[in-house]
Image (cartoon, rainbow, N blue to C red):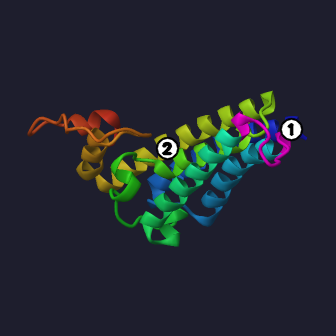
Amino acid sequence: MLPYLLALALTITPVALLFARFEYRRRGKLSVLGLMLLCVMILVPNLMLEFATVYAIPSTPLGYVGVLIGTAGLVLCLVSLAVFRSPLKVLCLDVGTLAVTGPYRWSRNPQYVGWFMFLLGFALNDWSWWCFVALLIVVSYIHLLILVEEEHLYRTFGEEYAEYCRTVPRYFGMPRESRRQPGSQEGGKRFPGLHG
């Protein structure tokens, strides 16, 4: 079953990412079909992880560390999604406003950081090579999805998002001072081809 899921993951991902990018550029938000493709793209590696592990009450120190990391990750993911305050925004079906409060002060993508921590914690409880492969796929897919979303957010929110990118790390860290000089166009360099 795991090789079939791997093949499906490698097949669906380019389709889902290209379709999401197309829809973000054309409509400014996802359609239900675009949302379904992205859900399948994210679900398949998670299914790989499910089939690769046998979850049980932790019996090793690594298993207990996994439970702590997974719990912290799930809490971070849920708190991050709650900041959106709209199910349609969570599902990328509505643009809404730029989220910059709560965990979004330290990460532009805390929901994805939390989800990865949850999966990592789950995998640490019953580590195998398939778990490693599934985690690599999840990290790769999420990173590619973030790049598509960043392009869309820059197009939608312009300089406000560019400034947010300059001050808040993509994944996690302390907010930093803006490096933008007054009157500079530094924000456009992150997302070439979007001006005009």
Q: Amino acid at mark 2?
A: Ile
Identify the element where label 1 is drawn: helix
In the visual, does 58 lie left or right of 159?
Answer: right
If the image is split into quadrants, where does the C terminus sit?
A: top left
Estimate the x, y position of residue 144 in percent, counting from the top left. 54, 38
Q: Nearer the viewer, residue 177 or 180?
A: 177
Residue situated furthest right in the rendering: 1
Q: Main secondary structure of the magenta part?
A: loop
Q: Amino acid at mark 1?
A: Leu
Give the CA distance from mark 1 to mark 2: 26 Å
Magenta span of residues: 51-63
Check the image and report above or below for 36 versus 185. Answer: below
If the image is split into quadrants, where does the N terminus sit?
A: top right
Is any atom of residue 146 visible in this view?
A: yes
Q: Nearer the viewer, residue 135 or 192?
A: 135
Identify the element where label 2 is drawn: helix
Q: Which mark is residue 146?
A: 2
In the visual, does 124 lie left or right of 144?
Answer: right
Q: Residue at x 40, y 53 (%)?
A: 103
Q: Which mark is residue 2?
A: 1
Check the image and report above or below for 38 versus 81. Answer: above
Mark with earlier residue (1, 2): 1
Estimate the x, y position of residue 155 in percent, counting from the top left. 35, 50
